[in-house]
Image (cartoon, rainbow, N blue to C red):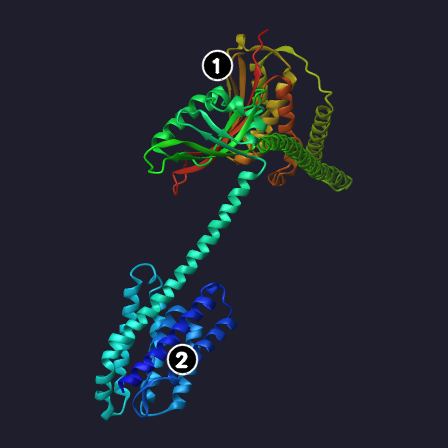
Amino acid sequence: MKESILIGLLQNAALLIAFSMLYQHVWIKDEASKSISAKIIVGLVLSSIGIILMSTPWMMVPGISFDMRSVLLSVSGLFFGPIPTIIAMFITGIVRVAIGGDGLWMGLAVILTSGSIGLLWRKYRPNWKSNNYYLELLALGLVVHIIMSALTLLLPRDMMFPTLKTIAIPLIFIYSPVTMLLGILMVNQYKNWQNELAQLKLKEYERRFTQILESGNIVSLLLNNDGSINFCNDYLLRIIGYDREEVIGKNWFDTFVPLDERAKLKQLFSKGMQIMEFSKNYENKILTKAGEELNILWYNIVLKSDNDDDVLGTASIGVNITDSKNHEKMLEEKNAEIEAQNEALKKVNLELMLAKERAEESDHLKSAFLANMSHEIRTPMNSILGFSDLLKESKLTSDKQQQYIAVIELSGKRMLNIINDILVISKIESGTVDIHNTEFNINDQIDSIYALFKDEIAKKGIDFSYINSLPDNEAFIKSDGEKIYAILINLVKNAIKFTSKGAITVGYHLNKDCEIEELEFFVKDTGVGVRYEQKELIFERFRQGSESLTRNYEGAGLGLPISKAFVEMLGGKIWVESKTENIFSDSPANKHETTFITTFYFTIPFKKK
């Protein structure tokens, strides 16, 4: 019995060594890139080894045999992974079923648990190769074979204890160490392959480094501790224009480094020698014999003695990047030039877009203006024609005739005002409006404005007042009185049109807080107000005619543009301020209500007589 066990163990050990050779020569080199088909083939090979192991077992009693398939499958799961191991488990399981015997269920259970433990160990202990891997392998072997011992419970009852008694010691003291030794062998194979790979990479690096040193644009330089030149290659001599005898022994920094960089580089060299470390990539300029500057990108290392106690100097490898720098500078200049051109083009495009928008807006506004003018002219014309036709009736009473005549007169005045505004705006557009400065009393104009509109405003139930800040004897100025009068009339008419209750005030103040004294006129009302976004638009020519607000009120909407043009001709400016205020109300439901206070201002220089 013992002789058969020993022979079986030796045969199994030989097969396991063959198993490790498969790992070394087939699996390690390209494990990460193995295809599915390759993994299937490896699984079939592992199955063959398992079948051979099962064919050379050592027998306890007929029907109950033992081999090292547990070692094979557990190590396979750990090293080869799922696909090869599962294939090996499946095929060896089929073979074990074919063998049959009293130990069938235990044999199948050993196949299943051994491979599964190896796979689980691989999944949940991925870094097991890093430290103390021999203990990991021993632990794997112990776990697998302790569970295998427990699986004797699947044997017939009369065979359980004798079998466990016979295999317990070999499983713990032979199978488990064999699992560890096989794993150590395969780990060493893996590490040997890694070392071979590292050596190949090192040789490749050495080959590339040699090629770099031999290339045409690499600078090689050795400096002593004091900065004197110990060695330089031919390429350095060629680009700086010196002979070797002129260079060797010279101080590198004093001879070849520009003055503005010399102190800084000497300090960096001294510090690097003290701490025995230099910046790996450093760029600086060097001088040629002709005084030209070259840009070199350096890789610097400290040269030490064999015992690392003494610093011998530095070794530097540099790349001449002068052409690249010049090309980069040229590109930067070209980019700057292109960016400047782009900015200029953007500006031109913006101006063209704005001009296009202004032209489109102007066309739109002029179209809206003409449509509004057509409406404004037709309305009084229809009234004139309609009521003129009514006057032809012979049965009209005297009161009716007077009423119709009054409508015709009012419509005629409205049409005349529209035509006058159109003529004025046309003259303004064509630049044919002249300024006629004369001496007049501004108080007289304010009084005239008040007298002109007093009755009309009173009929609407609106308070009307005026403010003259200067006494009559100081209110004489020299300006175009007709245009100031027209501006005030337009502003007051505007206030009357948009005010249904409250008050309207007209007047002026003398402003002495500016470089040139000026009169600041105002027309204040409690009408509908002016929205913030309309404060500039309402003074634009043709703009007012297109505003929806004007469709609720009669008029061409040319008063404010004409007023703005006249103010600017007189050397002043015009603007509007509109805000809400809480005012006292007689209403019993609400003692306070909110109203708009809108004030139009314009200034003219105060030129005395």
Earlier along the polypeptide chain: callout 2 or callout 1? 2
Quadrant in the picture for residue 241 = top right
Q: Work out whether 226 lies above or below 281.
A: above
The residue that label 1 is drawn on is: 513
Q: Residues within 10 Å of mark 2 (few under 14, many from 20)?
A: many
Q: Residues within 10 Å of mark 1 (few under 14, many from 20)?
A: few
Q: Which three-letter amino acid code belongs to the residue tagged 2?
A: Gly
Q: Which three-letter amino acid code belongs to the residue tagged 1?
A: Asp
Circle on res. 50 = 2
Q: Work out whether 86 lies above or below 464.
A: below
Viewer-nearest residue: 254 or 500: 254
CB under 8 Å between callouts 2 and 1? no
Viewer-nearest residue: 53 or 573: 53
- Return the x and y of residue 342 as percentages of the image width and height: 64, 34
Residue 469 seen in this snapshot = yes
* Residue depicted at 30% across the width and 64% down the height: 134
- Return the x and y of residue 270 as percentages of the image width and height: 38, 26
State which mark lies toward you, 2 or 1: 2
Label 2 residue SS:
helix
Numbered label tally? 2
* Residue depicted at 43% across the width and 69% down the height: 23
Q: Cα distance, mark 2 to mark 1?
A: 111 Å
